[in-house]
Image: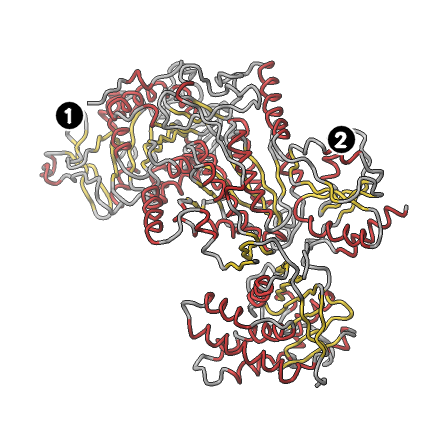
Amino acid sequence: MAELNKKEELGQVIIRFSGDSGDGMQLAGNIFSTISAIVGNDICTFPDYPADIRAPQGVLTGVSGFQVHIGADKVYTPGDKCDVLIAMNPAALKTQYKHCKPTAAIIIDSDSFTAKDLEKAEFKTDDPIAELGITCEVVPCPITSMCIETLKDSGLDNKSVVRCKNMLALCLVCWLFDRDLSLAENMLKAKFAKKPEIAEANIKVLHAGYNMGHNTHASISHTYSIESKQKAKGKYMDINGNKATAYGLMAAAEKAEMNLFLGSYPITPATDILHELAKHKSMGVITMQAEDEIAGCASAVGAAYAGALACTSTSGPGICLKSEAINLAVITELPLVIIDVQRGGPSTGLPTKSEQTDLLQVLFGRNGESPIPVIAATSPTDCFDSAYWACKIAVEHMTPVILLTDAFIANGSAAFKLPNLNDYPAIKPNYTTPEMIGNWTPYKRDPETLVRYWAVPGTPGFMHRIGGLEKSNATGTISNDPDNHHLMVEQRAKKVALIAERIPELNVEGADDADLLVVGFGGTYGHLREAVQQMNEEGKKVAHAHLNFINPLPRNTKEVLSRYKNVVVAEQNMGQLAAYLRMNIEGIKLHQFNEVKGQPFNVATLVEAFDKIISE
Amino acid sequence: MSEYKAQDYKFGQPRWCPGCGDHAFLGALHKAMSEIGVAPHDIAVISGIGCSSRLPYYMNTYGFHTIHGRAAAIATGAKVANPNLTVWQISGDGDGLAIGGNHFIHAVRRNIDLNMILLNNRIYGLTKGQYSPTSSRGFVSKSSPYGTVEDPFRPAELCFGARGNFFARCVATDMSATVECLKAAAQHKGASVTEVLQNCVIFNNGTHDSVYTKEGRAKNAIYLEHGKPMIFGENSEYGLAQEGFGLKVVKLGENGVTEKDILVHDAHCADPTLHLKLALMEGPEFPVALGIIRDVEAPTYNDSVHAQLEEVKAKKPYHNFAELLETNETWEIK
């Protein structure tokens, strides 16, 4: 045991919880990040869980991790490597220690390192630390036995007792980072409101662990505190990207005075959007769990036809199936929001991992000339704004809109300042008005925006017929005329292109005379931002432009990209955005940084790659 | 009395082949709608792809000609999002039972209040003559030059297998009976399936010959009416009676058979066993059953969805976005 330890002030720290997928690591990590946010730290989290619900206990494929990055100032990513790793068993240690900094402290549950446990994790010797060549500080704590000892009189069965051990791990971390346990207590009471005996047991374990840390200093040489810098005043909540997406849809429906409809089919990692919206029937939200992905989208097209703010949520494989119904909304010019929470592909691929590999699919993966606005959310909290924008564009421009998020931002969470809808732009669906009776045809367009007027079934005087066959310009009757078809193709494209007039310009963070402009889109914002910031701190001239709107591109995109002598497009695919930019900006020269590992970017790797471009 | 005439529901000039059964069916639909009396602007007619799916273009209502097989799913979304609409879903046998088979059974299972019309000509007409999922084994077509080697679906069997509560059958050219079926389908709350036997003059001429003419029906069909004995034949000389686990045709007056031995049709019976037996009858042994075979009330999907919304609205304290935000655990930075 060490002597009384030092307390160290830190600007930021990265902590990774890991254990069996049934060990409750996600809950422990969530509670810790929320209480850190409550005391005013900035947070960014990354749940890294396996596709198996419960792999056999103790095996390497069943390890579930949760990484949280806590900072006094703004943090943009869950961080590359951690300062503290909690490993609840040998399998967790083996798979997770590679995520540790050399200076990290690793806390292990010494009770779960028996010969049998080591064998399950495929260790060959009885010294896992030496076998893995771990050089950082390893702190063995008898987590399971402490848990059993604390709860021996609780009356709970053994299984329930052992399930509380994640709280012991949590409280060790709380002690290490000087966190107020009452916040964690409140969260546990809320979480187990219907099972007070479980809440009580968890709280008891929490205190026992805190005291263990305090009395023994847990053999750790430091405890830490992270101060809080002043953030914008106001109320905050913790939110992940899927929840923020659901909230954005509900906010837009209220603003547009429309009923929200979601047609969806369960698919990782998008299902939580369905779960979230299904809860809020008191808001008038209709969710329909359809018989398949196709029906999820088709029912939404039907709901849109009947006048709802209609959405469908899915991941890449679901987009493949929905493409035909999306195209029906393209030709009938009906508003529809399609949310693609991207995951690793192709095919079933890596269902729980994150990629940006659906970009070209959503831009071009349909038959015919089929232009669709595409928006990519940049962070968990930005999912709210992006979903709101997607709805606004859909109903104001009578078009399906694709919202791209990804597994990383969908599951990652951050502190979210409660939005005030008064600060958000109005949403005005392009409805017909009674004065138009007699002077209206289904494809008559607003001359400025080329948007057709929406006559919702049930409106007297506007009975009409639409469908998937090509239409005559303005009148909307079926037409096979060659010139008319060409005109309609052009009008659909122009209508979408004109949306560029209504969306924000591309913003550059950094100097105009930078040696390198880093360009990305969607969920990589945080990692690219942090890499660029780090290089700026090292005195390098690097700027960052991040695309939120991909189709149409912001109207100044060409001008921005042409300003820099070096432009690198960094994306989690093999160069899809780069290809799209080359197609749209003639003659542009782009460097590429591409990595498709199913994992978030690593800031150090990015810095190294960008450095190389500058020095060449 | 309805304030509308058949004319009020008509639009445009149908482009089906001369002699196609769809013409006759369209006329019956216009007439039925005028008798039902729902205003044209409160009706949405939603179809898939195929010859019969062109039908919405000939309706002076809201019409949506969608994509192949998906009409039931699209109609489901429209009805649940806007329950005030009366929604008719039009499909052929290929559209509804092959590419759209999954949506067909799930719409029926959910019991969404759609009037689902299945125009069954046992052929793909628009793609010029391939066998369909209702073509009988051995059927020779362009895609089965040596005859099919697969058994067909029987639509009623699918409907009942999916727990359907309404099934009617009519012949496209049999105007008054078709109108009656359509009116009953519209009146039924929940998913109603009406199978319309319809002839394709070009690629499958004569497929329903035994019942396509008035004379044929007199010999080879039975009109089922709720509460009435199941009697048929040119001179009403035959009846249906139960035998063991099945049905049999009996002749009145023969072997002491009297009217009291004849089954009385009960369309409202919750147990579908006999409805299925009736729906599956085929010649020459049995007459083809026409009319409303099953019509049983059950909670509809759209009503249940909206009832649940109201129930939760009354129970939960938040009803707008600002109130929703406050249901979360929040903290304040001052």
Residue holding disc 1: B235
Position of B154 with respect to A215 (left or right) is: left
Where residue A107 sits in the image (x, y, percent)? 67, 75
A518, above or below A211, in the image: above
Tag 2: amino acid: Ile
Residue holding disc 2: A585
SS state under label 2: loop
Query: Could you tell me which quadrant the C terminus of chain B lies in?
Result: bottom right
Q: Label 2 lies in what chain?
A: A
Q: Counting other residues with Cα less than 10 Å from the Cα at mark 1, is it few (<14), some (14-19), or many (20 or more)? A: few
A132, above or below B134, in the image: below
Query: Could you tell me which quadrant the N terminus of chain B lies in?
Result: top left
Q: Where, by quadrant of the figure, is residue B153 drawn? A: top left
A295, above or below A71, in the image: above
Position of A245 with respect to B88 (left or right) is: right
Instruction: Specify the farthest residue to the front.
Output: B334
Residue at the image position 49 percent from the left and 82 percent from the top: A151
Instruction: Specify the farthest residue to the right.
Output: A616
Give whichever of A205, B88 is nearer the camera: A205
Where residue B121 sits in the image (x, y, percent)? 39, 27
Between the C-alphas of marks 2 and 1, the distance is 82 Å
Position of A444 with respect to A3 (left or right) is: left
Give whichever of B215, A62 is nearer the camera: A62
Where residue A35 sits in the image (x, y, percent)? 57, 65
